[in-house]
Amino acid sequence: MSFNFDLFVIGGGSGGIATARRAAEYGARVGLAEFNRLGGTCVNRGCIPKKLMVYTSHFPRVLEESQGYGWSPAKSILDWPKMMAAIDKEVGRLNGIYQKMLDKSNVQLYRAHGKLLDPHTVEVENTKVTTDKVLIAVGGRPIKPNIPGKEYLVTSDAMFELPEQPQRVVIWGGGYIGVEFACIMHGLGSDVIQIIRSDKILKGFDEDIRTIIQESMEEHGIRILKNCSISEVKKTNQGLTISLEGDSNNDMVLADTIGLAATGRIPNLENLGLENTEVKVHNGVIVVDKYSQTAEQNIYAVGDCTDRINLTPVAISEGRAFADTKFGGKSCLMSYENVPSAVFSTPEAATVGLTEAKAKEQYGKNAIRVYSSEFRPMYYVLPDTKEKTLMKLVVHQESDQILGAHMVGDHAAEIIQGIAIAVKMGAKKADFDATVGIHPSSAEEFVTMR
């Protein structure tokens, strides 16, 4: 049978675009459908604009800390519309780059929604195209819990569209999105209350990371209400009245017009036409095998819609592994071991490999040795601030292999990215010990812990 395309990609996020370009490099005829901005969540409503807001939120602290180095006090006021306009301009620039990359790769872009009519036919722009293989890379979206007044809550998407800065912000959720926005908004000068369902933020991360970040957030002035949830939201003349249930001593809290629900995300599977195929969906997620293949032989899926590890670089790697295997003649598998990640909170955190708890669970408590160091970095000595940095190595005693590396502190993501290479290669503690440190730096602590 003759097809219009060798591969048709539904979804123009980072994973979909990377796959389309890689397949085209191998000579495949590739089409791609995306009805929204190119780049997906990361570029438009996630990693990039959020990181720019993180940078913005650090400047008040830097101005204050500079006085410890002899600089005179400086008064500066945030121009919120200017910040938002600058971020939107950068997002637009990145969209243009994605467009140019697709054009250069000869990928045919359809600025429309793609829907499967059968395993080999996609409806797009009121027409039908046929394809040998299909890749679903539609990503996910944030959702709001079903409570009275949920229409007054916003999701993380809306945080990049606020016309003015809210003075009182309530954030519901203790995951990395809630934590990052709590730190961003506090750094920008808003009063922040964070509501979490348990007694500690960042479930799934190493316990020491969770503890230090939460303690630091509270020391900086973020109010964290633990073991409670929002039961109802009402709009009043004073703003939003948010009722709580659980262990909180406060029956309700107030926000301006912003109550952020950062309580979860789901795949974007609506109106994809999956019912016209044999693709299986379980608990709202597309089921795939280790090659990203669905139950329909010619249909594949990568990224957040498969809910494996929901990180942009993972989606990109999954897509490229698929393209290499099916169009490049190379059998490639995506490895989900030792994938590094970061939380751009204040202080920042980054991690790779097993947590201390997971390592002990997997190998046994007595088989694990933990090396850690907690200190105040040199930068904070002259300003005399009580900022903490934590570095931690989780080591398998018998083999001396490093199973996990964790850090809280300035530039944690930059440092752990390098450490992740060593961990991925199977480095041993003796290899770290034999490495000469760069002095004076925080990073040298990773090679001096005994």
Image: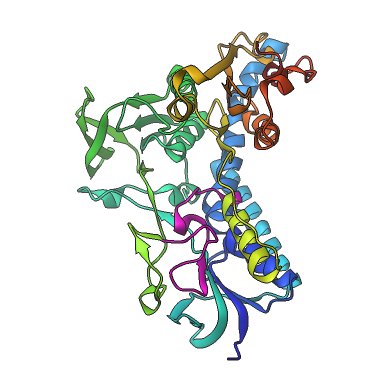
Q: Is residue 312 magenta?
A: yes
Give the image location of residue 199, x and y in percent. Answer: 32, 25
Q: Across the whole image, how many numbered discs are drawn on residues?
A: 0
Side (left or right) of 205 relative to 450: left
Q: Is residue 232 left or right of residue 377?
A: left
Which quadrant would residue 380 be assigned to in this image? top right
Q: Nearer the viewer, residue 358 or 134?
A: 358
* Majority secondary structure of magenta residues: loop
| Rendered-image quadrant of the N terminus | bottom right
Magenta range is: 287-313
* Screen quadrant of the C terminus: top right
User: Residue at the location (68% across, 58% down)?
Assistant: 93
Q: Position of residue 206 (x, y in %)?
A: 48, 27
* Colour pattern of the rendering: rainbow
Say which residue appears at 25% left-offset and 35% top-offset.
229
Vertical position of residue 299 compared to residue 309: above or below: below
Q: Is residue 388 visible?
A: no
Q: x, y (%) of residue 198?
A: 31, 29
Instruction: Tell me if 389 is positioned left or right of 262 in this view.
Output: right
